[in-house]
Amino acid sequence: MRFIVTVLAIIVVIAIVAVATGFVNLHGNSGSLPRVAVQGGSLPTVSANVGTIDVGTKNQSVDVPKVDVGTVEKNVAVPVVRVSKPQ
């Protein structure tokens, strides 16, 4: 249950950020109420201008350091904290 609520909250936050930053631009006109006669009303129309995201990979040469890590045992002074209850 907590997972579903968390996922829904994340989706809502992403939607708010997308609209606030202009990534999603919603344009719409209001619908009309149906008439009392048997004729129905009109549904609202919405056109959404949504940006695109391209995700991919490319090969590129990068300098990567090569580090050789080893361990040596040494005797060092280590801080100690002692907590005593009041008597």
Image (cartoon, rainbow, N blue to C red):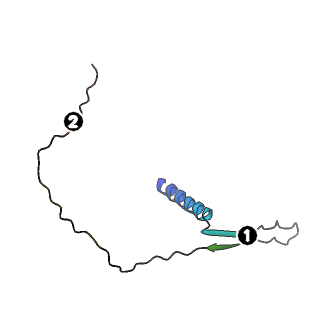
Front-lying residue, 82 or 87: 82
Count of marks, rendered view: 2
| Quadrant hosting residue 47 | bottom right
Q: Secondary structure at mark 2?
A: loop
| Location of residue 53 with respect to 70 vertically, above or below | below
Q: Residue furthest top?
A: 87
Front-lying residue, 48 or 58: 58
| Quadrant hosting residue 78 | top left
Q: Secondary structure at mark 1?
A: strand
Amino acid at dot 2:
Val
Image coordinates of residue 80 in percent, x first then y, are 21, 36
Q: Is residue 62 left or right of residue 31?
A: left
Residue at left offset 14%, top offset 43%: 76
Q: Which residue is mark 2?
A: 80
Q: Which residue is mark 1?
A: 28
Q: Is residue 59 left or right of residue 7?
A: left
